[in-house]
Structures are given as structure tokens and as C-alpha cells.
């Protein structure tokens, strides 16, 4: 594959960087809500929200690679724009699997900068259960730390309906839905969702096989793209500081111990970059990408931890003061480290995929393993 940006990626990346850099200059100390409505509307006016979506939802026909390019620029400025949740996951999923009525009702307002959608997808287990109801399903359950849930107008919720997953679109003012804001490590954008006998009509359901899994993969890739931007800019700021800060009349960047940590951080950032683009390219091409996505998220988690701590250590006390920008990058990187699964969780996922591959290639290898679970993975008994 070719790791160079396409012309569309270059154009969208440049437009996004200009917009977010200008916003950052006018908002040197942004709030902690995770959402700036004026910025969201500015993104809509600039065409960034619709650009990387299919034609059928009113987009420009670009896809995942272009979305990742925009997400990387959001990460570079840690901008309070829920593009990952509302566009890269929710709008893209509705555009891929939803019908025209669902697109018109829920996607169009998002592309106009008038609304946002927060996905509540399963991680280790599905949090919401569905049961039969006249003309649809009845949903119950509770899920904490739903990103962008504190301000979202609509939720894209994964629920278990028997042995399969379905996606439900539920508006914030729906009776039986309770939304309680949460303060997480880098802001107050998350929320706890509680559903008590919430009826969902068929018109608000996406039952297409594989839709929930598709959305989860896109959510993981979006987190990796954000993390790439966060870490790349954090390293740039740290290198600039190491060149300017002096001790014993010498820049601290001239000290061997500092140079070694910055070199290691550079390698980590490049590992995130290469694994992200490999996984995103395979996903967009329709090729098997589960292993590549797990590897990309492993590096986003592990490198996120190491680079974030290196940046703070080199900055010393200025790395944690709220008046300085590095603190925002540190907390953003720590959140992205665990969102979608930690590094350890990804290694387990990779191990399952390797065992699955070996079992399918050699049936005798499967002796001592249980039957595949709901995710299709084998487990040794």
C-alpha cells in the first residue's frame, strides 16, 4: 500500500489544520465540555462534516482515509469537536446500513452543524438488552462513559436481540432514557445512559447483519487517528521546549537522557502512524483488517502512555499546570489509551485472532478449545 496522502486527504487535512489552528489561537484555554457549538457549525460551513461521507447522505463521496486525516488534525489541537463519534462512527454507520428516512432524520441535521450523535457501542459485553415490542423493540440497560453523551441530541445504541446485535437510534428526550453527565480524565463530555423500557420503533432500528461490528471497528480506528494527532503535536511541543529550556547554560535537549527519550517517542509516534494507515487502508478496501486494527490500537495505547509521560517529564512542572497546553495533550492521550481497549486487551485480541487462524487452518489445533464465542473467537478450556 501507499502511505502517502491522497489529493483529497491533503486538501481536507490542510483545511482542517487551518480551521483548528485559527480556533486554537482564539481559544488558548478552551473549556472542558468537549463540545464547542460555534466550532462545530464552522466545520459544517467549511464542508468538513460532509466531505468524507457517501454521496447518499449528502457527502462528497470520500471515506475512511479522509476521515482519519481530519481526525488527526482534531487531535493535533485537541479541539472540542465530536467528529469521531458523530461523523466517523454514527453518520458513517447510518449512511452505510440505514435507510433514506433515517439518513434524512438523523444525519442531515448533523451535517448542517445543528446536532450531534453519540454511539453507545459494546466493548467486552453488550450493555443493553432488547425484547419484543409491538412495531419494534423494548430496550433496557445501563452503560457508563458514553463519549460525547453529555451533549448529544441522539444516541446510536447497540443492543442484544437474542443472539445478534441491533443498532437503535434514540433521541435524548425519549421517555425512559436518562442521561447523566460524567467528568472523565479530560473533560465532561461523557455520560451514563440508562434505558428503562424504552420502546424503539422499526423505523429507528438498523438490523443489518454486521452493522454493530462495523461501527465498533470504525470507532477504534477513529480513536487511533485522534491519538496520532495528539501524540505528534505533543512530541513537537516537547522538542520545541527541549530546544528552548536551558540548564547549566545548555538546552536540555542536548542532554543524552533527554535525547534518548525524545528519540524513543519519535519511534512510537511513527509506529502509531504506520499501523493506523495500514489498518485504515485495509478496512476501506474491504480486506480483512481485524488483526491490523488490533495492532493499531495496541500502538495507540502503548505509545500513548509512553509519549504522554515523556512529554510531561521533559516539560517538568509546566507539563501539568492547567495554564499550559501540555496538560491537555497528556489527559487526551491517556483517555485515548484506554478508549476501545487498553494495550493488554489488544494483545489478548491479537492472541485470539492468531489462535482462530491456526484452528481454522489446522482443525487438530482446536482440540482443547471451546466453541467460538459471540465474537467468533475460540477460547481454550
Image (spheres, rainbow, N blue to C red):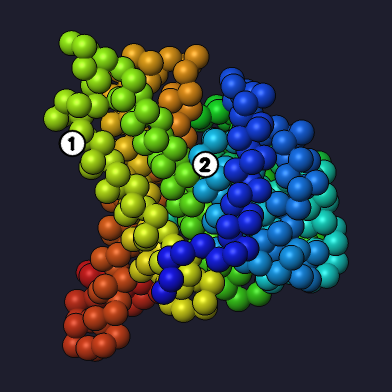
Label 2 sits on a secondary structure element that is helix
Q: Quadrant of the C terminus?
A: bottom left
Q: Which of marks 1 and 2 is nearer the N terminus?
A: 2
Quick one: 77 or 207, which is closer to the camera?
Answer: 77
Image quarter for residue 284?
Answer: bottom right
Residue shown at 45% from the left, 52% from the top:
224
Say left or right for 254 vs 285. left
Residue farthest to the left? 256
Which mark is on residue 75?
2
Q: In which quarter of the image is the N terminus?
A: bottom left
Residue 347's place in the image compared with 305, above or below, is: below
- Name the residue beneath numbered marker 1: 260
Residue shown at 23% from the left, 42% from the top:
264
Residue 254's place in the image compared with 150, above or below, is: above
Residue shown at 64% from the left, 54% from the top:
12
Q: How many marks?
A: 2
Residue 285's place in the image compared with 166, above or below, is: below
Say left or right for 375 vs 57. left
Residue 217's place in the image compared with 241, above or below, is: below
Location of residue 174 in the rendering, given as x and y in whole percent from the top left corner: 80, 45
Residue farthest to the top? 248
Location of residue 122 in the rendering, given as x and y in whole percent from the top left corner: 52, 55
Q: Give me the C-alpha separation between circle 1 and circle 2.
A: 25 Å
Location of residue 24 in the rendering, given as x and y in whole percent from the top left corner: 61, 29
Say left or right for 84 vs 171. left
Mark 2 Cα within 10 Å, few/some/many (few <14, many 20+)?
Answer: many
Quick one: 243 or 63, which is closer to the camera?
Answer: 243
Quick one: 205 or 381, which is closer to the camera?
Answer: 205
Image quarter for residue 3?
Answer: bottom left
Amino acid at each position: 500500500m501507499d502511505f502517502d496522502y491522497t489529493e483529497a486527504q491533503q486538501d481536507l487535512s490542510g483545511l482542517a489544520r487551518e480551521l483548528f489552528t485559527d480556533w486554537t489561537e482564539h481559544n488558548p484555554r478552551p473549556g472542558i465540555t468537549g463540545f464547542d457549538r460555534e466550532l462545530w457549525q464552522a466545520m459544517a460551513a467549511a464542508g468538513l462534516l460532509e466531505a468524507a461521507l457517501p454521496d447518499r447522505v449528502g457527502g462528497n463521496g470520500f471515506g475512511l482515509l479522509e476521515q482519519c486525516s481530519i481526525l488527526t488534525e482534531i487531535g493535533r489541537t485537541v479541539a472540542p469537536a465530536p467528529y469521531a463519534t458523530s461523523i466517523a462512527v454514527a453518520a458513517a454507520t447510518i449512511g452505510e446500513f440505514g435507510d433514506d428516512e433515517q439518513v434524512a432524520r438523523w444525519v442531515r441535521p448533523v451535517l448542517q452543524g445543528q446536532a450531534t450523535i453519540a454511539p453507545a457501542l459494546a466493548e467486552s459485553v453488550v450493555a443493553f438488552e432488547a425484547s419484543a415490542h409491538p412495531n419494534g423493540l423494548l430496550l433496557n440497560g445501563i452503560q457508563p462513559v458514553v463519549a460525547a453523551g453529555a451533549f448529544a441530541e441522539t444516541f446510536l445504541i447497540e443492543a442484544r436481540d437474542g443472539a445478534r446485535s441491533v443498532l437503535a437510534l434514540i433521541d435524548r428526550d425519549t421517555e425512559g432514557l436518562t442521561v447523566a453527565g460524567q467528568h472523565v480524565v479530560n473533560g465532561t463530555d461523557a455520560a451514563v445512559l440508562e434505558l428503562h423500557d424504552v420502546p424503539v420503533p422499526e423505523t429507528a432500528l438498523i438490523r443489518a447483519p454486521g452493522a454493530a461490528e462495523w461501527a465498533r471497528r470504525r470507532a477504534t480506528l477513529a480513536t487511533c487517528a485522534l491519538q496520532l494527532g495528539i501524540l505528534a503535536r505533543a512530541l513537537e511541543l516537547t522538542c520545541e521546549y527541549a530546544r528552548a529550556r536551558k540548564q547549566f547554560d545548555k538546552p536540555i535537549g542536548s542532554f543524552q537522557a533527554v535525547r534518548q527519550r525524545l528519540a524513543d517517542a519519535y519511534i512510537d509516534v511513527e509506529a502509531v502512524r504506520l499501523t493506523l494507515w495500514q489498518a485504515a487502508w485495509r478496512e476501506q478496501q474491504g480486506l480483512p483488517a481485524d488483526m491490523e486494527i488490533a495492532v493499531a490500537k495496541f500502538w495507540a495505547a502503548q505509545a500513548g502512555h509512553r509519549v504522554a509521560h515523556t512529554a510531561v517529564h521533559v516539560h517538568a512542572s509546566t507539563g501539568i499546570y492547567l495554564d499550559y497546553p501540555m496538560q491537555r495533550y497528556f489527559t487526551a492521550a491517556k483517555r485515548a489509551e484506554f478508549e476501545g481497549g487498553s494495550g493488554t486487551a489488544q494483545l489478548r485480541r491479537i492472541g485470539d485472532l492468531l489462535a482462530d487462524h491456526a484452528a481454522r487452518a489446522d482443525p487438530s489445533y482446536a482440540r482443547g478449545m471451546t466453541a467460538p464465542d459471540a465474537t467468533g473467537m475460540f477460547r481454550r478450556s
